[in-house]
Image: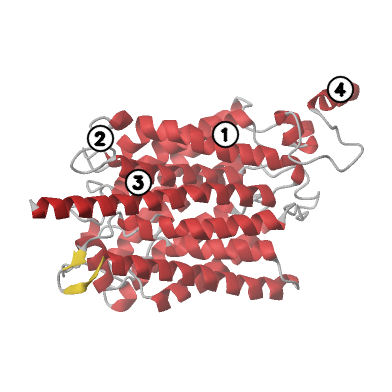
Amino acid sequence: MENSWEQSVTYSINTIYLLFSAYLVFVMQLGFAMICAGSVRAKNAMNIMLTNVVDAVVGSISFYLFGFAFAYGNSNPFIGTNLFALANIPNENYDYGFFLYQWAFAIAVAGITSGSIAERTQFSAYLVFSFFLTGFVYPIVAHWVWSSSGWLSPNSSDLFLGSGSIDFAGSGVVHLVGAIAGLWGSIIEGPRVGRFDAYGKPVPFRGHNAALVVLGTFLLWFGWFGFNPGSFDKILVAYPDTPDEGNWTSIGRTAVTTTLAGSTAGIVTLFGRRLLIGHWDAMDVCNGLLGGFVAITSGCSVVEPWAAILCGFVSAWVLIGLNILALKLNYDDPLEAAQLHGGCGTWGLLFTGLFAKKKFVNQTYNSGVAVERPYGLLLGGGWGLIGAQVAEILVIFVFVSTTMGPMFYALHKLKLLRIPVHDELAGLDISSHGGYAYAPQEENHPRSYGDYLRMQEDQS
């Protein structure tokens, strides 16, 4: 009887911890919304905030009906085929709290993609790609890496290259997936009108509100403490050889590595951009900070704090370099989402393959039981883990490209992707949503949707 009571208490505390982590991750949606709103021009603020709401509500239904089943149905190594619409939930493996936590991750993916195609995309296109990405593309990648039956899973009974890919909280599964989807959407749509001049030189399109960007950054930082430490799912798991340590120890360490990586990336970006452009830029620092968080998300639970500092240092230069390259290639991403989430996410996966510590790998994936398995290459752990990390990067790029690329191209051919030029110049708020997020500041701007329609009639 006493043992049963202890099990109930343990289960209750673990469930509370997981639910609290889910709430923290959901707060990240507000962070995304604030960063997106501040990073675009004022005439598109309402549109980008509404797309963040749509990502959440459409993703909720999509992930409930199909996504969770594709991700965590335990049937084969490539895709789940049961648990649709939460059938047979709760069961011995999953309950409602676990679904809620995974749902918060799923809707974050669509938010990343939305940033890449901001300020020139038809609202109906958001509805289509959000449903498809959240309900099909992301869940399949999640199944490969996070389901116990997934072919890349570090928890699989048949480990790929004897290791499986360590992507603890989703540098690849979440961030790289969203980034590759956004990359193709942005390439197919093309740059915003006026973003590059006739000679291909970039024209600055500054975000209109740095205060919203800073607020969003801090909200995301707060939410990341649910994103990374929360991915342990359970807090009351003791390690057998060290009774004073358990998941609670690893959770604390994960929070520390997350903080150190982001902070280092923010500092390096601050001084790096100062050297390149000659002034201190708040928005660049915020993006650099987030790049550090994205990079450490893969290995946050299996690396030492000193390694997290190195991770953040490199991620800052990855983001700075990719942003320079993007401008040279006339690639237009208003939120730098593909560079930030894709570039830093890729570096994060490679970093884990280089610096994962053997002891921490066993704590994270074997509850502290000493098991011989590959770990960081530079720590003497062999090539198995780094090979699995590279495999994850490659398969994500190929799979997302062959699913989201054709989908965006089909929307483009059907004229359902990009808005007309005159609507884009007027701004999506007035042309698509009937008004502005703020009162118009210029006399020649239409002050209502009726004014906008009359102006269109006069021009025609």
Q: Which mark is residue 89?
A: 2
The image quadrant of residue 61 is top left
Residues at circles 1 and 2 in contact by the CB criterion of under 8 Å: no
The image quadrant where one finds the C terminus is top right
N-terminal of the two: label 3 or label 1?
1
Crowd around label 3: few <14 · some 14–19 · many ≥20 (10 Å): many
Q: Is residue 83 left or right of residue 35?
A: left
Disc 3 is placed on an element classified as helix
Could you tell me the amino acid type at mark 3? Answer: Ala
Give the labeled residue for mark 3: 142
Give the labeled residue for mark 4: 454
Q: Is residue 40 left or right of residue 460?
A: left
Residues at circles 1 and 4 in contact by the CB criterion of under 8 Å: no
Where does the image place residue 257, in percent across and percent down from the top left?
Answer: 42, 70
Crowd around label 2: few <14 · some 14–19 · many ≥20 (10 Å): some
Q: Is residue 442 left or right of residue 82?
A: right
Crowd around label 4: few <14 · some 14–19 · many ≥20 (10 Å): few
N-terminal of the two: label 1 or label 2?
2
Q: CA distance from mark 3 to mark 1?
A: 22 Å
Give the labeled residue for mark 1: 126
